[in-house]
């Protein structure tokens, strides 16, 4: 993949996408695969903001049943199935347990009724291409069965729980990248580290202006450029209102988008294959999600007041989450602050403002043209879930095609596997590759397939041809070859891009200085960093590993 901005010649695109999170990436792919000439610009790295802050689930959202958001749940469950088909290495069925205690705000019986509804809404869950990934129906468990699965669950007042299947998303970071790569495959022009500072606007009258493109800064070269487009789509997630204000209010920010913050942390604990979820003593929903032999603990949902750039995970937020979880889980062992290996968080843009509590706010999305405000040539997309992004993209591009008066063209994204995900039978693919690369441990090959899908062959080729690149870096079996692959093929530009997004090596906490040094030495050589630049890159990465004190 090449950064188009390096050689941009001033041509007019059909569509310019601002933001390279999952929304922008899906929209760029949808547009390119329907024949539009599209450019995508991202101010940081692809998928580095909210899209890297998820709970790693591709799910219907059981809890949205309690707010009667049946349409959202149904759409999410349908999309879960679609994503299983088009991205079999990223989306995996996984067992979940929702426990019920006496005096929980939703009783065992009500939860069971909820499960019947959830099942009904996912009636098509096994209409999947790869039957090896079929999901069984839910099952109610009694207290003893719950304790057999989770010996550390509190036994007092435990009534039982529901065992059901949803999907986990192995690597939301690489999943977003796969949408970007798919867009590029169909001709999209993409560039990370390219920030939109303003819009190119033609003022027609006092009440009417037309957006004709965007003014950007290439943050790598420092060069400013104007990119022309017939239509611009604002996919900046929690920054959506700030971006809009550039054209609506001459840069004066009104802070009209509500945002809620959510955090997670990773602990070195293996709770088995099943995700545990339940209500804390204060009635908050929490979960313990198995992730690469560790546990991902989440999440919070609290109104965030301030600018998105100022958001960070705080000690108070972590302590709050620990308190909630410890109030309802952990017989012998409670979570301690020192157990935390890594933490991350993000901001959810919320599109409705009637609900006071952000936790109860909808996760629906909106696609709005700005014509009613006298601004043509601009569409904004706000809200949504990672799970529903493909569908959002399909609807957004229907609107784009209508506005541009282009001939209708059927979407292929529901029926075409993403770039690198072209796998018919996942189990068989694993077996074949495990045999082909039998010098490596099977779990390592499976891990690499989850990350790279069919691109595993490119990684293995690099590794097998160069003993330095063949070095195994962690228990999952990540290889130094991935660093070179990320730089040469995946537009990785910073050390953070490599450690936290192209690879998964940073996502379980600090992998140790020796590993960081190996990765940095190779990256510095490939990207021609001098000593000073190398030091800077390491210091940014080290900061990201810090647990707030
Ligand atoms: C804590 C938490 C947990 C979640 N868990 C789940 C889950 O398990 N499953 C699920 O389905 N959903 C989940 N979600 C929701 C999901 O993460 C979001 O719906 C999704 O990531 C939104 O993607 P996006 O592309 O709209 O936003 P983002 O990923 O934030 O992308 C917006 C991009 O715009 C870029 N940008 C901003 N300003 C500019 C500019 N001036 N120029 C260029 N680029 C710019 C930003 O850098 C950013 O990369 C969760 C959300 C949170 C916060």
Image (spheres, rainbow, N blue to C red):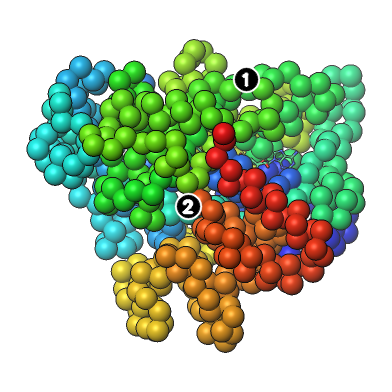
Residue 31 at x, y = what percent?
A: 63, 51
Q: Is mark 1 within 8 Å of ligand 1?
A: no
Residue 345 at x, y = what percent?
A: 54, 37
75 to the left or right of 221? left
| 402 w.r.t. 477: above or below | above
Crowdedness near tag 2: few (<14), some (14–19) or many (≥20) residues, C-alpha within 10 Å: many
Residue 342 at x, y = what percent?
A: 50, 45
Residue 416 in view:
yes
Between 69 and 265, the one lying in front of the other is 265
| The C terminus lies in quadrant | top right
> Can you name the residue that lies furthest to the bottom here?
465
| The N terminus lies in quadrant | bottom right
- Please name the residue shown 74% across and 32% down the image: 243
Which numbered disc, 2 or 1, marks the residue closer to the eye?
Answer: 2
The disc placed on residue 305 is 1
The image quarter in which residue 9 lies: bottom right
Crowdedness near tag 1: few (<14), some (14–19) or many (≥20) residues, C-alpha within 10 Å: few
| 171 w.r.t. 287: above or below | below
Residue 66 in view:
no
- Please name the residue shown 73% across and 28% down the image: 242
Mark earlier in primary sequence (2, 1): 1
Between 420 and 43, the one lying in front of the other is 43
How far apart are the two marked residues, 2 and 1, measured between alpha carbons? Answer: 29 Å
The image quarter in which residue 267 lies: top left
Q: Quadrant of ligand 1?
A: top right
Residue 474 at x, y = what percent?
A: 47, 65
Q: Secondary structure at mark 2?
A: loop
Q: Which residue is mark 2?
A: 508
- Please name the residue shown 32% across and 56% down the image: 128
Q: Secondary structure at mark 1?
A: loop
Between 250 and 481, the one lying in front of the other is 481
């Amino acid at each position: 993949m090449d950064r188009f901005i390096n050689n941009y010649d001033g041509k007019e695109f059909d569509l310019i996408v601002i933001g390279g999170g999952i929304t922008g990436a899906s929209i760029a792919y949808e547009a390119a695969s329907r024949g539009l000439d599209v450019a995508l610009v991202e101010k940081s790295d692809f998928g580095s903001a909210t899209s890297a802050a998820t709970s790693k689930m591709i799910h219907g959202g059981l809890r949205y049943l309690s707010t009667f958001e049946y349409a959202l749940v149904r759409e999410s469950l349908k999309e879960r199935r679609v994503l299983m088909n088009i991205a079999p290495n990223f989306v995996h069925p996984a067992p979940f347990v929702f426990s019920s205690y006496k005096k929980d705000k939703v009783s065992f019986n009500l939860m069971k009724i909820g499960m019947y509804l959830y099942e009904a809404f996912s009636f098509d869950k096994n209409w999947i291409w790869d039957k090896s990934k079929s999901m069984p129906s839910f099952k109610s468990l009694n207290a003893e069965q719950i304790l057999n699965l989770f010996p550390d669950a509190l036994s007092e007042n435990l009534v039982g729980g529901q065992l059901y299947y949803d999907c986990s998303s192995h690597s939301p970071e690489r999943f977003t990248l796969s949408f970007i790569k798919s867009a590029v495959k169909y001709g999209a022009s993409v560039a990370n580290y390219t920030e939109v500072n303003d819009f190119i606007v033609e003022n027609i009258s006092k009440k009417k202006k037309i957006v004709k493109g965007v003014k950007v800064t290439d943050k790598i070269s420092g060069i400013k450029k104007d990119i022309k487009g017939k239509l611009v789509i604002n996919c900046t997630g929690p920054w959506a209102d700030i971006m809009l204000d550039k054209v609506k209010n001459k840069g004066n920010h009104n802070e009209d988008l509500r945002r809620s913050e959510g955090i997670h942390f990773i602990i070195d604990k293996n709770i088995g294959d099943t995700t545990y979820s339940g209500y804390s003593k204060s009635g908050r929903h929490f979960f313990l999600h198995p992730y690469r032999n560790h546990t991902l603990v989440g999440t919070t949902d609290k109104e965030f007041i301030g600018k998105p750039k100022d958001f960070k995970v705080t000690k108070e937020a972590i302590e709050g989450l620990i308190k909630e979880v410890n109030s309802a889980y952990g017989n012998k062992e409670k979570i301690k602050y020192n157990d935390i290996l890594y933490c991350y968080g993000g901001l959810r843009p919320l599109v409705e403002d009637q609900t006071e509590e952000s936790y109860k706010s909808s996760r629906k999305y909106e696609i709005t043209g700005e014509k009613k405000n006298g601004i043509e040539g601009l569409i904004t997309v706000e809200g949504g879930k990672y799970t529903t992004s493909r569908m959002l993209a399909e609807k957004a591009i229907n609107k784009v095609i209508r506005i541009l008066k282009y001939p209708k063209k059927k979407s292929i994204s529901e029926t075409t596997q993403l770039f690198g995900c072209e796998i018919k039978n996942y189990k068989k693919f694993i077996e074949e590759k495990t045999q082909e690369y039998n010098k490596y441990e099977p779990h390592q090959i499976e891990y690499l397939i989850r990350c790279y899908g069919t691109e595993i062959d490119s990684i293995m080729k690099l590794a097998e041809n160069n003993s330095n690149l063949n070095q195994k870096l962690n228990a999952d079996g990540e290889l130094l070859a991935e660093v070179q692959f990320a730089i040469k093929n995946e537009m990785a530009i910073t050390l953070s891009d490599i450690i936290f997004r192209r690879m998964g090596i940073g996502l379980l906490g600090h992998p140790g200085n020796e590993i960081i040094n190996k990765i940095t030495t190779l990256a510095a050589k490939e990207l021609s960093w001098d000593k000073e630049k190398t030091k800077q890159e390491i210091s940014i990465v080290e900061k990201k590993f810090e647990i707030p004190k």
